[in-house]
Amino acid sequence: MASFTIQGGNTLSGEIIPQGAKNEALQIISAVLLTPKTVTIENIPNIRDVNKLIELIGDMGVIVEKISESTCRFTAKDIDIDYLETDDFRIKAASLRGSIMILGPLLARYGRAKIPKPGGDKIGRRRLDTHFLGFQHLGAKFNYEPKDGFYNIDASNLKGTYILLDEASVTGTANIIMAAVLAKGKTTIYNAACEPYLQQLCRMLNRMGATISGVGSNLITIEGVEVLEGTTHRMLPDMIEIGSFIGLAAMTRSALTIKGAGVEHLGLIPTVFRRMGIAMELQGDDIFIPAQESYEIETFIDGSIMTVADAPWPGFTPDLLSILLVVATQAKGTVLVHQKMFESRLFFVDKLIDMGAQIILCDPHRATVIGLNRKQALRGIKMTSPDIRAGVSLLIAALSADGESTIYNVEQIDRGYQYIDDRLRNLGAVIERGQ
């Protein structure tokens, strides 16, 4: 189990470039299975979850050519669909949450697919019903084998239809779109997710020859086509990394510039951090966060305490609530953090309380943070990272704390943040990786 040892209390400075978007990468890389032609993808993040997905589709027969550190060329001309029957596939697919995204492309192109129950963060229930109900609407037959934990799908005759999603699932919407692009006839998806990463997927598929309209709205229409061609696609900067760096700057009283932040795709992220009292300047496509000795959480107009909750896009992303919660520990004021989507995502706050934070965990979904206003610094402790976002939140807390902290199980952080220790050292952080 790898670890980080951090000497906290140091001010950071400099520029940092966000990696390519992890959540976009899992969709885009899966989409190469839709065509036998070559697809070139740029700005791929070098992180464990993405690398494991690339390895998985490579084992399926996709030719993967690494052009540069962040660019790969994929050619899915000869796919061994029988590889899905092997123990090797079962083991690798079960270890990766993103493996669910290969289902839509395989159903569209080969008419059948199967996958074991995928892994991922232990942040609460993450049901897959939206994916499978969507496939069934398109005419697929679904069967779950509880003995071996495999989901089996027969989709030999997919036909377009009207689909009203029971939830605006990002991965569910993406999977259904990828299944529908080669289906016969028209598919209409209502209550569709519309995150920037999903918009990116739709634009890429349209360049490949798909006919998708309503991109960016919650009503998407797909006219099925016979075949898709190749294309070149560049992924957006990762909005979760950008939010993490904003929180890092505030907690460590640092002046940081986030280069190439893709400001137009960030939605409410800058607004919500500003409500936490964090100053920032948008300089073209860069974000400059000046050093602040203190920052004060806004209240609502009637004087009641600020509540920040996650919501489907264009609402505030749930992936940044953990960061926001940590930022609030050293702010002036109080905030109620409401994590609606996952009931286990706030279960890392005990570590922050051990560090000296004043947090009341109201229930699995809500925590009230009473800001210390820098009057009492957090103190370094030993702790374990439970998931990607909580892990980075604890890392930010450790970088701002007095004394030494050790974070174990940092493989969780590596799943979502590339070279994070090297990049932080370049800003002046004192952090060492151990085994």
Image: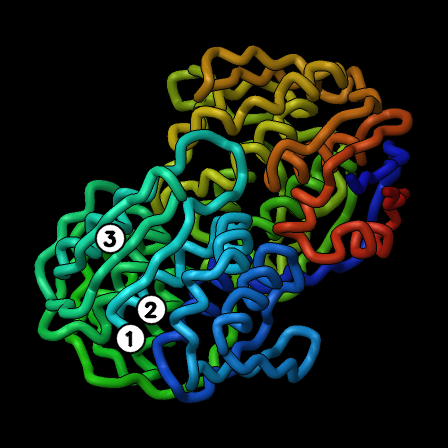
Q: First in sequence: mark 2 or mark 3?
A: 2
Query: Is disc 2 surrounded by few (<14), some (14 to 19) or many (20+) residues within 10 Å?
Result: many
Q: Is residue 114 left or right of residue 400?
A: left
**Residue at image mark 1:** 109
* Amino acid type for the residue under numbered disc 1: Arg
* Amino acid type for the residue under numbered disc 2: Pro
Front-most of residues 314 and 39: 39
Way the structure is coloured = rainbow
- Residue 261 in sight from this viewpoint: no
**Residue at image mark 3:** 192
* Amino acid type for the residue under numbered disc 3: Ala
Residue drawn at (62%, 38%), measured in percent from left and top? 278
Tags 1 and 2 touching, CB below 8 Å: yes
Residue drawn at (66%, 63%), measured in percent from left and top? 46
Q: Is residue 141 left or right of residue 91?
A: left
Q: Quadrant of the N terminus?
A: top right
- Residue 158 in sight from this viewpoint: yes
**Residue at image mark 2:** 105
Quadrant assignment, res 141:
bottom left
Closer to the observer: label 3 or label 1? 1
Q: Secondary structure at mark 3?
A: loop
Q: Secondary structure at mark 1?
A: helix
